[in-house]
Image: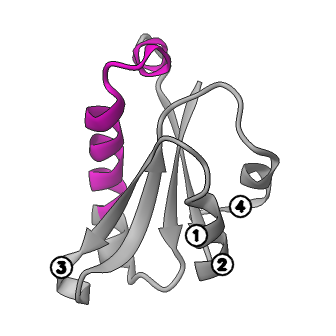
């Protein structure tokens, strides 16, 4: 069981850190009642944070059960997307670069 958080690669580091924290909480709150979220919380509740380009970000929005985060200090730009925890992920997620 894992939650993925994708951060756009053009987001400055300080905003990216805040976006990742907010994304985790937003996804938990949105999907708290889902059976997969309950299983995820039972532990260990893994999260994978990836850095993606604009095209990858837009393509990832096609995957169900997500929440998009914006940043008011960046004129409301979309900065992150977090997905409901699940055991199986679409193949494209294996190719996203880890945020380092």
Say what secondary structure mark 1 lies in. Answer: helix
> Depth check: 31 or 62 in front?
62
**Image quadrant where one finds the N terminus:** top right
* Label 4 crowd bin: few (<14), some (14–19), many (20+), radius 10 Å: some
Residue 29 falls within the magenta-colored stretch: yes
How far is disc 1 from disc 4 in space, using C-alphas?
10 Å
How far is disc 3 from disc 4 in space, using C-alphas?
26 Å
User: Mark 3 against mark 4, which lies toward the viewer?
Assistant: 3
State if disc 4 and disc 2 touch (CB < 8 Å).
no
* Label 3 crowd bin: few (<14), some (14–19), many (20+), radius 10 Å: few
User: Mark 1 against mark 4, which lies toward the viewer?
Assistant: 1
In this view, the residue farthest toward the left is 72
State if disc 1 and disc 2 touch (CB < 8 Å).
yes
Tell me which label, 1 or 3, sits earlier in the chain: 1
**Image quadrant where one finds the C terminus:** bottom right
Say what secondary structure mark 4 lies in. Answer: loop
Q: Position of residue 93 (x, y in %)?
A: 72, 51
Find residue 81 and report its image quarter. Answer: bottom left
What label does residue 96 carry, if any? 4
Question: Which residue is tagged 1?
Answer: 57
Question: Which residue is tagged 2?
Answer: 55
Question: Which residue is tagged 3?
Answer: 72
Q: Which residues are magenta?
A: 19-41
Q: Position of residue 56 (x, y in %)?
A: 66, 71
Tell me which label, 2 or 4, sits earlier in the chain: 2
State if disc 3 and disc 1 touch (CB < 8 Å).
no
At x 61%, y 49%, the residue is 63
Judged left or right of residue 36, residue 73 is: left
């Amino acid at each position: 069981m894992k939650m993925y958080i994708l951060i756009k690669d053009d987001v400055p580091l300080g905003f990216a850190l805040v976006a990742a924290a907010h994304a985790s909480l937003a996804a938990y709150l949105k999907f708290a009642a889902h059976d997969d979220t309950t299983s995820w919380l039972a532990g260990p509740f893994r999260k994978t944070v990836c850095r993606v380009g604009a095209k990858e970000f837009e393509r990832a929005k096609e995957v169900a059960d997500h929440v998009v985060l914006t940043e008011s200090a960046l004129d409301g730009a979309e900065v992150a997307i977090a997905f409901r925890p699940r055991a199986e992920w679409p193949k494209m997620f294996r190719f996203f670069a880890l945020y380092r």
